[in-house]
Image (spheres, grey):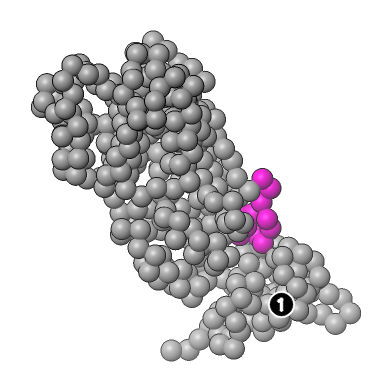
Amino acid sequence: MMETTNDIRTDNQGSKEIRRYAEAIRRHIGSSGLQPGDRYLSASEASCMLGCNITAAQRAMTHLAKIKWLERRPRAGTFVGTAALQEKISHCVHFFLPESICREKNTQNMIWQRMLGVKSVIPNVTVEFDFVPRQDLAFVQQVVERMNDSRGSVGFLVLLSSQAIREYLNQCGIPAVIFGDIEPHLQNLCWASLDQKQVGRLLAEYLVKRGHRRFITVMRDTWGKGDYLLHDSIGETLADAGLAANSLQIRSIPVDRTAIIATLRSRLEELGDEKLALICRTEFQADCVNELAESMGVTSQLDVVVCNSSSDIASCKYACVVPDLPYQEEGMLAGRMLLEMMNGRRPSPRGYSIPVRLVVPGGENESK
């Protein structure tokens, strides 16, 4: 098969790093609206944009000149080449989601709204949803390798990833935005997350005011930094209320109806006359708890709340915490950070902690 002259992959001797810099320059040309013949950056300016040394920038630009994306004119400078007019790249963002998210129907609206926000910032981008089975790092590595061989792929959006996946994406240096909290040392990643400490405090305070002294958190079986922040805040709030450390129990359960019901059944069988508060990570988990409670006839003894609801506020069935920012605007924040990285710049700020508020069904109470 004949190779096209404007394909970055024709430089078989170029390193992955140089190809990545060349791709970043080409994306910058496309997103800047530059046309063939327009003056482009010098190697020194390009190195500042890319955050690399001048030699690496020079090699990337030399490669792009060979395939006519750039034109070098002696004593005049560097200009946009004719290939920029001949080829229009369809940029693709990969959205990593855990395979188990398919069971959480209420998250679909949240995901969709975030994507609308991203596309409002990067209108020409297409999105490829990659459902990661069992937080499989090898699966993610395969997608990244395919991306390195793709002219149109530009970056990643990531929801509910394991630390191993975040570590890997940080090492790759590919533009990536995490929906959730990240570890401080992952300096190459950007993030947008609900304020998890505020989430924990609002829910714990609400339940303590309702007279509860026994609590269970129902979590997914994969934890991230935000889950630890959440539990730190719940524990601190209960301690401030004078409750003992053993007043809180934690259950980490796969996102599976059968597993959730089987795990919690024995605890509910021990209730007696006791009242119990359950803090569920998701509405799906809360629905499973409610189903179990109804079958056992103990609904009146339970208070079920949700850490963050992805439903419309008007249709919330549980006391829950919602962002003080629409999901679409959260997606716009992620889109802006991703676009900055696509263009070889380091976003500032590198992340956003989104404030939240408590909503109770029936509108009897809303608080921040």
For the image shown, how many numbered marks are present on the structure? Answer: 1
Residue 21's place in the image compared with 112, above or below, is: below
Residue 259 in view here: yes
User: What secondary structure do most residues of the magenta stretch adopt?
Assistant: loop
Residue 129 x, y percent position in the rendering: 38, 56
**What kind of residue is marked 1?**
Ala
85 or 269, which is in the foreground? 269
Residue 252 x, y percent position in the rendering: 30, 43
Q: Which residues, given as a range, are shown in magenta? A: 339-349
Mark 1 lies on residue: 56
Residue depicted at 68% across the width and 55% down the height: 346
Position of residue 311 in the picture relative to residue 13 (left or right): left
165 or 174, which is in the foreground? 165
In the rendered image, the residue lying farthest to the right is: 75
Position of residue 31 in the picture relative to residue 71 (left or right): left
303 or 24, which is in the foreground? 303
Residue 26 in view here: no
Residue depicted at 75% across the width and 73% down the height: 53
